[in-house]
């Protein structure tokens, strides 16, 4: 098992804290704890605040718990997926909370750990599971899915226009008895399949790797439900802050917020609303908040981050 250091720069930290407007005794859920940067800042700035930190990655949870040990009982770590936030809250004895934070990006620890298979910078087994104790790996998906399903997956979650060509190459290799099993094998296959322009700094396999990670962890399928459950947990005037890192996530968050703010998504010709839109929140970010240039210079991985915030309305 490779070693890693629990060093982490939390994205949009000051902006998140500014929106939360916490008090000294606030109770917060950090739904995607990671290495605990947002949680640490909350516990430091608000003396009697408490944070429940949820993460499905056992190694990240262990590292964050060690980092936050000095706060004693004010921090409680929970091994779970953020989609189960209602269950995690109930098991922690919470009916309502003052705020919820969710940073949906892959942590630097996960990207920099060669064994996890998230990055083509390292030659490693093609895993990509956030929770390594359950679920199918990316290699298993590519070994089991039909060509059309692989192409649709890469196109839908990676927005890769050459997804069909990539899928065909993956299946042809599999039929020769050489299934794609490592990050290097996949990266090289994609690069050969689609080519590489010297003008494009983005590695040609980037979109394919993103698509597989999303599919392996069902990142989009659980997001809309998470937002609804989070609003249910908030006290009146409680805030939900969600940070996304690609357009697919951001679109889901934007539309979920809009629906919860009462916007109807029914076709215009329908005489009455049937989509169930009810005004439950106020959207505090008309446009998503993005990192300042100074933050992007210090932490290049923050460049694609977008923060959206809503406030639960009083009944």
Image (cartoon, helix red, strand yellow):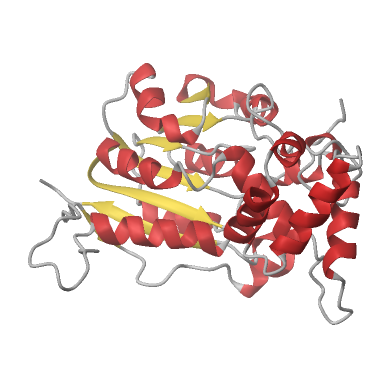
Residue 247: percent from left, percent from top: 54, 64
**Left or right of residue 165, residue 242 in this image:** left
- Name the residue at the left extreme: 271
Above or below, 97 relative to 240: above
Which of the 4 image quarters holds residue 24? Answer: top left
In percent of the image, x 85 and y 38: which residue is there?
A: 181
Residue 121, given in percent of the width and then of the height, sits at 87, 52
Q: Is residue 271 left or right of residue 135?
A: left
Quarter where residue 179 is shown = top right
**How far across and how far down the image is residue 112, in percent?**
81, 44
Which residue does the image show at 87% across and 72% down from the upper left? 196
Q: Number of labelled discs?
A: 0
In the figure, is residue 5 to the left or right of 221? right
In depth, the one of 185 and 244 nearer the eye is 185
Residue 125 in the image: above or below residue 307: above
Asked which quadrant contains residue 113, the reply is: top right
Q: Is residue 214 above or below residue 96?
A: below
Q: Nearer the viewer, residue 141 or 17?
A: 141
Q: Position of residue 162 (x, y in %)?
A: 72, 67
Which quarter of the rendering shows the N terminus?
top right
The answer to whether residue 221 is visible is yes
Q: Residue at x 65, y 35 (%)?
A: 130
Nearer to us in this view, 277 or 81:
277
Q: Is residue 47 visible?
A: no
**Residue plotted at (56% across, 37% down):** 33
Residue lying farthest to the front in this orientation? 175
Specify whether 137 is left or right of 119: left
């Amino acid at each position: 098992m490779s070693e890693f250091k629990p060093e982490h720069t939390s994205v949009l930290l000051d902006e998140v804290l500014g929106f939360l407007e916490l008090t000294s005794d606030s109770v917060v859920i950090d739904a995607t704890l990671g290495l605990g940067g947002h949680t640490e800042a909350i516990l430091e700035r608000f003396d009697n605040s408490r944070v429940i930190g949820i993460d499905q990655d056992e190694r990240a949870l262990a590292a964050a718990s060690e980092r936050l040990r000095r706060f004693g009982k004010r921090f409680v770590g929970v091994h779970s997926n953020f989609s189960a936030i209602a269950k995690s809250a109930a098991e922690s004895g919470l009916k309502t909370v003052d705020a919820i934070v969710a940073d949906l990006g892959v942590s630097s620890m996960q990207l920099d750990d060669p064994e996890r298979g998230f990055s083509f910078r390292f030659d490693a087994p093609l895993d990509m599971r956030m929770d390594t104790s359950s679920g199918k790996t990316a290699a298993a998906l590519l070994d089991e899915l039909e060509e059309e399903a692989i192409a649709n997956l890469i196109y839908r979650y990676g927005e890769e226009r050459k997804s069909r060509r990539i899928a065909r190459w993956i299946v042809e290799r599999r039929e020769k008895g050489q299934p794609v099993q490592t990050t290097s094998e996949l990266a090289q296959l994609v690069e050969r399949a689609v080519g590489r322009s010297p003008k494009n700094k983005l590695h040609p396999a980037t979109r394919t790797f993103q698509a597989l990670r999303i599919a392996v962890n069902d990142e989009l399928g659980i997001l809309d439900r998470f937002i609804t459950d989070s609003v249910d947990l908030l006290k009146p005037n409680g805030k939900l802050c969600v940070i996304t890192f690609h357009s697919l996530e951001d679109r889901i968050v934007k539309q979920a917020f809009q629906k919860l703010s009462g916007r109807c998504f029914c076709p215009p010709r329908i005489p009455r609303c049937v989509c169930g839109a009810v005004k439950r929140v106020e959207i505090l970010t008309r446009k998503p908040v993005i990192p300042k240039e100074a933050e992007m210079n210090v932490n290049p991985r923050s460049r694609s981050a977008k923060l959206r915030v809503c406030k639960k309305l009083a009944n």
